[in-house]
Image (spheres, helix red, strand yellow):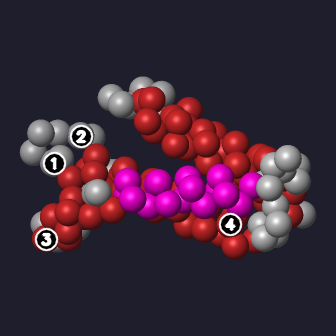
């Protein structure tokens, strides 16, 4: 069952990476989500490495923190919808979506780190 769940999350983050191929800045997003997918796949096959999981978690968390001002601005605007198309009049949509995507990745990596044995290292 645990292997199935890990592979499920690997698939979800692989799908996130795929959906970001048409993003204006695809390299960073495909790399981020792709790395999360690879770490979940490695964990599914007993090849998790806590050092790598932790390093990516910290990197994505720091990146997410750079978007906090955009989230505050979104709240200040009264939480307008983020499901519409991007317009020059609604730049909050991109920031909020990116923040939430990173938030999902950080939470998932945190859970993966927490459930990975302390001595897990790729050999």
Where residue 25 sits, quadrant-wise, is: top left
For marks 4 and 2, give the one nearer the viewer.
Answer: 4
The tag earlier along the polypeptide, 1 or 3, is 3
Can you give x and y, in whole percent of width and height, for residue 49 in the image?
75, 55
Give, as a single range, the part of the protein colored magenta. Answer: 49-64
Q: Does the magenta stretch include residue 26?
A: no
Element carrying mark 3: helix
Q: Name the residue under label 3.
A: 76
For label 4, the SS is: helix
The image shows residue 100 at horizontal and vertical percentages of: 41, 59
Quadrant of the image containing the N terminus: bottom right
Residue at mark 3 to residue at mark 2: CA–CA distance = 19 Å
Q: Give the residue number, with chain letter if any, for mark 4.
A: 113
Instruction: Tell me which numbered mark, 3 or 4, is placed earlier along the sequence.
Output: 3
Query: Sequence-wise, which precedes: disc 3 or disc 2?
Result: 3
Labels 4 and 2 touching (C-beta < 8 A): no
Q: Nearer the viewer, mark 4 or mark 1?
A: 4
**x, y percent for residue 120:** 82, 61
Within 10 angstroms of label 1, few (less than 14), some, or many (20 or more) residues? some
């Amino acid at each position: 069952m645990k292997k199935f769940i890990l592979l499920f999350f690997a698939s979800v983050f692989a799908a996130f990476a795929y959906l970001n191929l048409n993003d204006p800045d695809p390299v960073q997003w495909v790399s981020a989500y792709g790395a999360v997918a690879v770490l979940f796949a490695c964990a599914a096959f007993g090849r998790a490495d806590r050092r790598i999981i932790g390093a990516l978690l910290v990197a994505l968390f720091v990146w997410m923190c750079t978007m906090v001002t955009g989230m505050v601005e979104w709240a200040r605007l009264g939480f307008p919808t983020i499901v519409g198309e991007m317009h020059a009049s609604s730049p909050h949509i991109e920031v909020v979506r990116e923040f939430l995507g990173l938030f999902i990745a950080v939470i998932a990596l945190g859970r993966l780190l927490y459930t990975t044995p302390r001595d897990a290292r790729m050999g």
